[in-house]
Amino acid sequence: MAATPDRPSAATPRRKAGRHRGEGQWAAGHFTPLNANEQVKKDDDGLNVRTRIETIYAHRGFDSIDGADLRGRMRWWGLYTQRKPGIDGGKTAVLEPEELDDEYFMMRVRVDGGRLTTEQLRVIGEVSQEFARGTADITDRQNIQYHWIRIEDVPEIWRRLEAVGLSTTEACGDTPRVIIGSPVAGIAEDEIIDGSRAIEEIQRRYIGSKEFSNLPRKFKTAISGSPLLDVVHEINDVSFVGVRHPEHGPGFDLWVGGGLSTNPKIGVRLGAWVPLDEVPEVWAGVVGIFRDYGYRRLRNRARLKYLVTDWGPEKFRQVLETEYLKRELADGPAPEQPVQQWRDHIGVHRQQDGRYYVGFAPRVGRVDGATLTKIAELAEAHGSGRVRTTVEQKMIVLDVDRDQVESLVSGLEALDLRVKPSPFRRGTMACTGIEFCKLAIVETKERGSALIDELERRLPEFDQPISINLNGCPNACARIQVADIGLKGQLVTDRDGNQVEGFQVHLGGTLGLEPAFGRKVRGLKVTSAELPDYVERVLRRFQEEREDGERFAA
Ligand code: SF4
């Protein structure tokens, strides 16, 4: 394999080695890889694996795949091996990676801004049915995720997706991942600014470019001009949040350094206002800082949030302005508190142009290829050619005339896609879990779906916004730390002393302008079987004790 040069191709800042020399920052002269992941990236750029997939692996099959490609570089094209069926969660931590690997892949399709045409949705549905055993989940970052993908089929899947403008480029890996965007960008009546153009421009200029294909770790972006703050901007590496500047008008407030997983951090404001046209350049400056100054020694300290914590917002902004943008940014205001707690755009809402958009809730993001195809057909039959995915694992059909709304709502409800969901259907999310994820300890999707049914049956009168997020392991794919009720999958001891699937409970997490991480209540663990009883008790107590206007997280 061709080795990458010793130094990054992009401009390297002239900065002397500092006190963090040992963290492996390129800007401190550390180009010698300090761990196995960094070595893999230095040996060959992750993007280069595509050629090997197309010319070798797809023809010779799974066993021909180089180990460093299989468990490393294939992520640069949205491919992870999935978990071998039948391995219980107790073995997750003790088996070697190759013992957990199935010969099938999860494939992530990036859906930047959550924007899809019905033509694209049909192709996603076709690929699901033809190559992915019908699977197609909506993730909490607006992506679509397939399972059961064979390496032999990958080139044909790419051909079909790319023919309609979709891709899996940098959907995973140490790269700029999907750019999440307001799912009602350009259509919502209350919009401050439409960030779509910035998302398209970042995609066009930088996604798939080797300028940013070797970052210390993944890099997450959110851009929204919605006053509902609908893209979880608080927990992205960089976020552009719509605000009105008193002199300059609509633009974006710049946030950096958010992230969950180990050592969760809420992003910090840099106090800078960015006009729409400058978002791509500022974005590239922030990613450049991460590439050059980001910590590469330890994987668990490699996210941007650690650098931001060490530097603080003032120094981060100063380095961004002086070394990357070569100019100062304007100061700007903070976003305002949203007027409502639900941020998911579920229900029927008027658009700027007088038509309507209709947001609906599948169960915990679980749909399938056949259902996605039917959604595309329904949308088209009611005059729409556009749909969107949300960061709550929901979907929206856009551009519906008033006289078509009722019929569309009936059609969606007939597919069990609720336009008027219960708070439980609306507020419950679940990660992939043990069904396919190699890191999982417990099952999540079925558990989350069953929990919704139980809570709807037991608490039909409950009408408060509530978020219940289930993770299959201590990672943060379903954002448990910022949920009202966060459930972290682990093995727990049941009444008979057996080790069984269960959850550590975190209570009272929330996002918004006063974000908080849920409190991990010591000893508060429930078995999966006891989960409905436990959540019912918590919600009943909240209902009985809450004062007027009090939210669950208060
Ligand atoms: Fe897998 Fe854990 Fe992420 Fe769930 S939270 S998808 S189990 S890594």
Image (tube, rainbow, N blue to C red):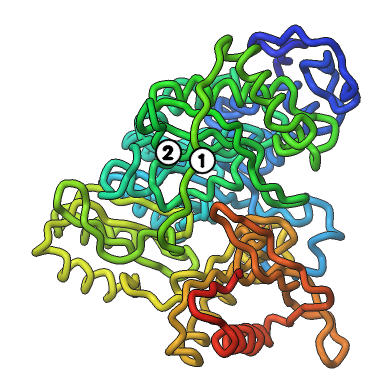
Q: Residue at x 25, y 49 (%)?
A: 189
Q: CA distance from mark 2 to mark 1?
A: 7 Å
Instruction: Determine the residue positioned at 32% across, 57% down.
Output: 396
Mark 1, Cα crowd under 10 Å, few <14 / some 14-19 / many 20+, is many
* Percent x, y of residue 91: 82, 65
Q: How many marks?
A: 2
Going by the numbered disc 1, the residue's amino acid type is Ala
Q: Nearer the viewer, residue 202 or 160?
A: 202
Label 1 lies in ligand 1 vicinity (Cβ under 8 Å): no
Are discs 2 and 1 less than 8 Å apart at CB? yes
Q: Which residue: 75% across, 21% down?
A: 42
For badge 2, the amino acid type reads Val
Q: Between disc 2 and disc 1, whose residue precedes?
A: 2
As helix, strand or loop, the secondary structure at mark 2 comes to: strand
Nearest the eye: 304 or 472? 304
Q: Identify the residue position indicated by label 1 in the image.
A: 334
Q: Position of residue 353 (x, y in %)?
A: 16, 47
Horizontal and vertical percent position of residue 62: 64, 43
Would you name the residue on which mark 2 appears? 243
Image quarter hosting the C terminus: bottom right
Q: Is residue 544 above or below residue 503?
A: below
